[in-house]
Image (cartoon, grey):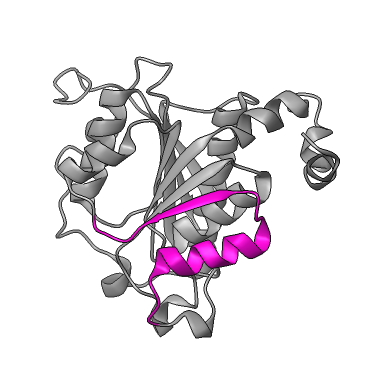
Amino acid sequence: MNELQLDRYSRQILLPNFDIEGQQRLMQARVMVIGMGGLGNIASCYLAAAGIGHMTLVDDDVVELSNLARQVLYRQDDIQQPKALAAKAQIAQMNDEVEVEVVLQRLDEASLTEKIQGYDLVLDCTDNFKIRQIINKLCHQYKIDLVSGAAIRWEGQVQSFLFSKEDTICYQCLYPELNDTNLNCSQSGIISPVVGSIGVLQSLDAIKILSKCGQVVHAKLRVFDGFDGVWRDINLTQDPECVICG
């Protein structure tokens, strides 16, 4: 690292269990963020600020006025611009050392299979059950760590799957029968700080996994009730009949 990098990342390098080695691991890491809505906004900001070497931002949507209340990476001038491109521009203003690639399409299994290989970690920030199951399947298949988040109304949840290291449960074990008729934010609403809280935790888990610093819970679902301001941890068990990891 050069002097400017040492200065930029000095506060996290000062951490005794992080140090220069942790920073170097982040700077060499390749992360794919799928979904650049509220979760992807917050998570990608913190990853860029922390010095992730490469991020690929995946989203086929454009910025709308109704997004601005919770998708804080965007500005009014970004309305009708592709979300991933608008996010890339803002991230470049934050940290131009981060290499950012954009994918402006909705990925199916074939296209995601082609693109996902070679990444160290995937953040699932989507609101679509079908693509969530595809992401889970491919991350498990290629042993790529996965950090999954979701938020709706006053509630959010986050869980990490350490497929590269652990014989662990997967997203299919957790939600084997969920489908796309379930509620989404456009139908049920969302309070923006809840999305931000989950996105922050996704980025924190990602940073700990990639830097190999700190403990990451991999068999537990963390659920946040923003209305009452309480967290619940739910222990998870592997489904022996799971079609992905059983």
Relative to 246, 28 lies left or right: right
The quarter of the displayed image where residue 236 is located: top left
Q: Residue at x 50, y 64 (%)?
A: 87
Whether 99 is among the magenta residues is: yes
- Looking at the figure, which quarter contains the N terminus? top right
Which residue is depicted at the point 54% across and 79% down?
75
Quadrant containing the C terminus is top left
For the record, the magenta segment spans 80-106
Residue 159 lies, in percent from the top left, at: 42, 38
Q: Kindly tell me whether residue 194 is visible in this rendering.
A: no
Query: Which of the 4 quarters of the picture holds residue 25?
Result: top right
Horizontally, is 189 left or right of 184 in the view? right
Q: Find residue 61 and report its horizontal and vertical position in percent.
A: 31, 69
The spot of residue 86 in percent (x, y) is 48, 70
Residue farthest to the front, as pictured: 2
Q: Nearer the viewer, residue 173 or 135?
A: 135
Q: Nearer the viewer, residue 9 or 173?
A: 9
Judge left or right: residue 26 versus residue 245. Answer: right
User: Residue 13 location, x and y as percent?
Assistant: 79, 34
Q: Is residue 35 above or below residue 52?
A: below
Residue 46 visible somewhere in the drawing: yes
8 or 96, nearer to the observer: 96
Asked if residue 25 is positioned above or below residue 89 in the image, the reply reads: above
Q: Is residue 113 left or right of residue 150?
A: left
Q: Considering only vertical position in the picture, is 235 above or below 97? A: above
Query: Measuring 32% from the left and 68% from the top, which residue is drawn there?
Result: 185
> What is the quadrant of residue 16 in the picture?
top right
